[in-house]
């Protein structure tokens, strides 16, 4: 009889357990699929996101015996797989950014004043942001979006992409400078204090 995973089980423990009981891997899907879906959906749109997230977990499942159990958190590993799969869809991602430049802003906002303020800001910023993102080199874009949309720390981005932390910092700095310049020296990837 298999013991169900608990919330305290580390990702490494779940992956190791899935070698004997493949159904244990489902707990990783439950933990991270929504997070990965948000990230991929922002990059490729909701149409492709479900497929890419599903493929991410298929690839992870097939490679789970090679997972490093010293890494208790599997998020960087999963985001790395997803980012590589997104790279295969780079044409679709570029087309999405071009479409965003031309599309109206939508989404729920609290009240009339907030709706007007958010609409004006988003409408003014969206085309420039989409243009800036579509003009970034793939390696810089991946780092920027893993930090901004994937909510990964620098060390996690380094693990996800298999690059040194210093490279993450330099790529992120370069990407932020280019985006900031395209937006008139503002940076939408940083939270204001």
Image (cartoon, rainbow, N blue to C red):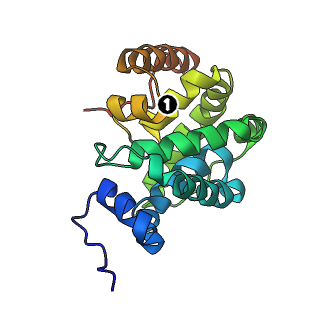
Examine the rendered structure and indicate whether residue 109 appears above or below residue 2: above
Q: Residue at x 47, y 42 (%)?
A: 149
The total number of labels drawn is: 1
Quarter holding the N terminus is: bottom left
Would residue 70 be visible to someone looking at this image?
Answer: yes
Quarter holding the C terminus is: top left
**Is 131 or 147 nearer to us in this picture?**
147
Percent across and percent down for residue 91 are: 78, 36
Q: Residue at x 53, y 50 (%)?
A: 63
**Is 16 or 58 nearer to us in this picture?**
16
Q: Is residue 83 left or right of residue 78?
A: right
Percent across and percent down for residue 108 are: 51, 61
Examine the rendered structure and indicate whether residue 19 appears above or below residue 147: below
Residue situated furthest front in the rendering? 20
Percent across and percent down for residue 92 are: 76, 41
Q: Residue at x 72, y 35 (%)?
A: 90
Residue situated furthest bottom in the rendering? 1
Percent across and percent down for residue 75 are: 40, 48
The residue where tag 1 is placed is 161
Q: Quadrant of residue 127?
A: top right
Helix, strand or loop status at disc 1: helix
Assess disc 1: are there few (<14), some (14-19) or many (≥20) residues with their C-alpha within 10 Å of its C-alpha.
Answer: many
Q: Is residue 56 left or right of residue 66?
A: right
Q: Quadrant of residue 186?
A: top left
**Is 38 or 188 nearer to us in this picture?**
38
Would residue 109 be visible to someone looking at this image?
Answer: no
**Is 98 or 90 nearer to us in this picture?**
90
């Amino acid at each position: 009889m298999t013991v169900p995973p608990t919330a305290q089980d580390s990702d490494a423990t779940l992956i190791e357990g899935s070698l004997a009981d493949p159904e244990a891997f489902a707990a990783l899907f439950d933990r991270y699929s929504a997070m990965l879906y948000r990230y991929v959906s922002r990059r490729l749109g909701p149409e492709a996101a479900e497929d890419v997230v599903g493929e991410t977990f298929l690839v992870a499942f097939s490679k789970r015996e090679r997972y490093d159990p010293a890494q208790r958190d599997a998020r960087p590993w999963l985001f790395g797989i997803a980012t590589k799969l997104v790279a295969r869809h780079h044409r679709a991602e570029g087309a999405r950014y071009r479409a965003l430049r031309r599309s109206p802003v939508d989404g729920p906002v609290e009240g009339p004043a907030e709706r007007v303020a958010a609409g004006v800001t988003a409408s003014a910023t969206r085309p420039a942001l989409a243009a800036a993102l579509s003009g970034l080199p793939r390696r810089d874009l991946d780092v920027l979006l893993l930090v901004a949309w994937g909510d990964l720390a620098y060390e996690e981005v380094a693990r996800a992409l298999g690059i040194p932390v210093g490279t993450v910092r330099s790529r992120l700095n370069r990407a932020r400078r280019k985006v900031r310049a395209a937006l008139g020296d503002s940076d939408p990837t940083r939270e204001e204090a």
